[in-house]
Amino acid sequence: MRKTLVAGNWKMNGRAAASRELVEQVLAGLAEVDRDLVDVLVCPPSVYLAQVCQQVEGQAVANAPLVVGGQNLCEFADGAYTGEVSAEMLVDIGCKAVIIGHSERRALFGDDDARIAAKLKAALQAGLMPLLCVGETLAERDSGAALDVVGHQLRSALAGIEAADMAQVVVAYEPVWAIGTGRTATPEQAQEVHAYLRSVLADMFATVSDQVRIVYGGSVNAANASELFAQADIDGGLVGGASLKANEFLTICQ
Ligand code: PEP
């Protein structure tokens, strides 16, 4: 059975004190969450990652740690890459996961298919759990191309990955038109895409496709999470805005 994953993407929000307070509140509230059923991950801005990693260190809640991940990484290892952060640096400070290919990075920072594939490989090589984001724009959905778009994104990012490494990979379906807009995909719309993504995984990695978690992202909140997560192929959520409010995030986890 696939264990539900709830991941918070804080994006470029907060300051040191606010990050500390949010993590304190989440750690306190996780005592009420059945951690046998759900893994919980937070992805703070890179400058606060070390602080958050230190804060959660040794704070296992009901035998399951609050996992910390980056929002991005550089596909290269050490060297002359001004402003970048490598996979090994994330591991070095205690991160266990990283978001790759978020639509904001694809649209605003030039993360194309080739770079996303390289970043995913770098994450796996360093032992990080990559959350690979795929998703169509509104124009692509309206023209009937949603499945083709996400299928292409998935295939190109995972080309050359060994089936044995897929247990570590999480796929996040994030329709661009639902991110930060308050307009959530209906459970049926999301399930249709998740089932399709799983069929692509089955085509690429027959033996492990049932084990790969596919989470949904796009205006997930405390009111809509349970209906979305109840769908057969939706294994949790990647949560943006609602992950900045501890109560809302904890309700989603519950
Ligand atoms: C996201 O940024 O990954 C996201 C899903 O944002 P929001 O929940 O705010 O739509």
Image (cartoon, rainbow, N blue to C red):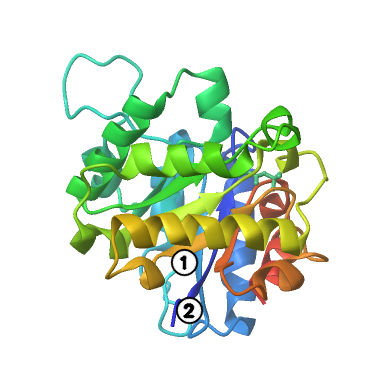
Q: Are marks 2 and 1 in contact (CB under 8 Å)?
A: yes
Q: Quadrant of ligand 1?
A: top right
Say whether residue 117 is visible. Answer: yes
State the quadrant of the C terminus: bottom right
Q: Classify residue 18 by image quadrant.
A: top right
Taking the spot 30% from the left edge, 14% from the top edge, the residue there is 82
Taking the spot 83% from the left edge, 45% from the top edge, the residue there is 182
Q: Amino acid at mark 2?
A: Val
The circle drawn on residue 127 is none
Q: Which residue is mark 1?
A: 66
Q: Is residue 184 above or below residue 45?
A: below
The spot of residue 25 in percent (x, y) is 64, 64
Say whether residue 100 is visible. Answer: no
State the quadrant of the N terminus: bottom left
158 lies left or right of 37: left
| Cα–Cα span, label 2 and label 1 | 7 Å
The spot of residue 47 in percent (x, y) is 45, 34
Instruction: Count every numbered label the image shows and give the total.
Output: 2
Q: Which residue is mark 2?
A: 61
Local packing at callout 2 (Cα closer than 10 Å; few below 14, some 14-19, many 20+) is some
Local packing at callout 1 (Cα closer than 10 Å; few below 14, some 14-19, many 20+) is many
Taking the spot 27% from the left edge, 42% from the top edge, the residue there is 159
Taking the spot 55% from the left edge, 69% from the top edge, the residue there is 235
Q: Classify residue 21 by image quadrant.
A: bottom right
> Which one is in front, 60 or 233?
233
Say what secondary structure mark 2 lies in.
Answer: loop
The spot of residue 37 in percent (x, y) is 52, 83
Q: Amino acid at mark 1?
A: Leu
For the residue with label 1, is its CB less than 8 Å from the closest atom of ligand 1? no
